[in-house]
Image: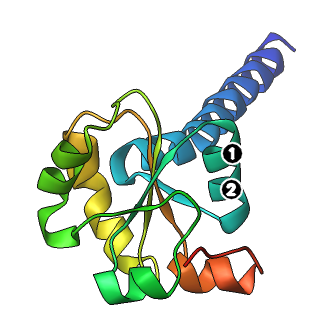
């Protein structure tokens, strides 16, 4: 009977370890790759957390329509754009492009500049439009 109790305890410990790892993996993934944000999550970051919004699209696309409060930032020189804007590194940053691909690529560079929280709008401006959220001209 004692042997069966030990097996039960080992099974419970193994379950606890596996559960802990499963809960931690998304956090680890976010720390390594940065956070992908849905349109709803981006809205919450912008409205409640006063996140900066950096639009990485070309100026012509930006002028046609951009997220409210967005600042234009050249994707190929994002470090220089951020320095020119004098952004507070304690505030979150939402990166936006047309489809989300360019924003994902820029995530690590913005994190290296000392920003604690950086997210990329999954699906970019296209996803923002599909969610029927407003664009500013």
10 up-or-down from 84: above or below: above
Residue ID at (17%, 43%):
83
In percent of width and height, residue 13 lies at 68, 23
- Whether residue 73 sits left or right of residue 78 in the image: it is right
Residue ID at (72%, 86%):
130
Judging depth in this view, the residue of 133 and 16 nearest the camera is 133
Are the residues tagged 2 and 1 within 8 Å (C-beta)?
Answer: yes
Secondary element at tag 1: helix
Residue ID at (67%, 66%):
39
Image quarter of residue 115 = top left
- Whether residue 116 sits left or right of residue 94 in the image: it is left
Q: Which residue bears the numbered disc 2?
A: 43
Image quarter of residue 78 = bottom left
Judging depth in this view, the residue of 23 and 10 nearest the camera is 23
- Cα distance in 3D space between marks 2 and 1: 6 Å
35 up-or-down from 65: above or below: above
**Callout 1: 10 Å neighbours few (<14), some, many (20+)?**
few
Q: Which residue bears the numbered disc 1?
A: 47
Image quarter of residue 129 = bottom right
In percent of width and height, residue 22 lies at 62, 43
- Whether residue 20 sits left or right of residue 56 in the image: it is right
* Any part of residue 98 in sight: no
Direction top: furthest residue:
2
């Amino acid at each position: 009977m004692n042997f069966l109790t030990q097996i039960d305890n080992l099974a419970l410990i193994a379950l606890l370890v596996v559960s802990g790892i499963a809960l931690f993996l998304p956090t680890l993934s976010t720390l390594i790759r940065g956070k992908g944000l849905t349109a709803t999550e981006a809205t919450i970051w912008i409205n409640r957390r006063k996140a900066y919004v950096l639009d990485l699209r070309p100026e012509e696309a930006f002028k046609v329509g951009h997220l409210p409060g967005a600042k234009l930032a050249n994707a190929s020189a994002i470090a220089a754009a951020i320095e020119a804007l004098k952004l507070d590194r304690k505030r979150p940053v939402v990166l936006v492009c047309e489809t989300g691909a360019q924003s994902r690529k820029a995530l690590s560079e913005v994190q290296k500049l000392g920003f604690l929280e950086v997210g990329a709008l999954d699906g970019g401006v296209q996803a923002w439009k599909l969610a029927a959220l407003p664009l500013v001209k």
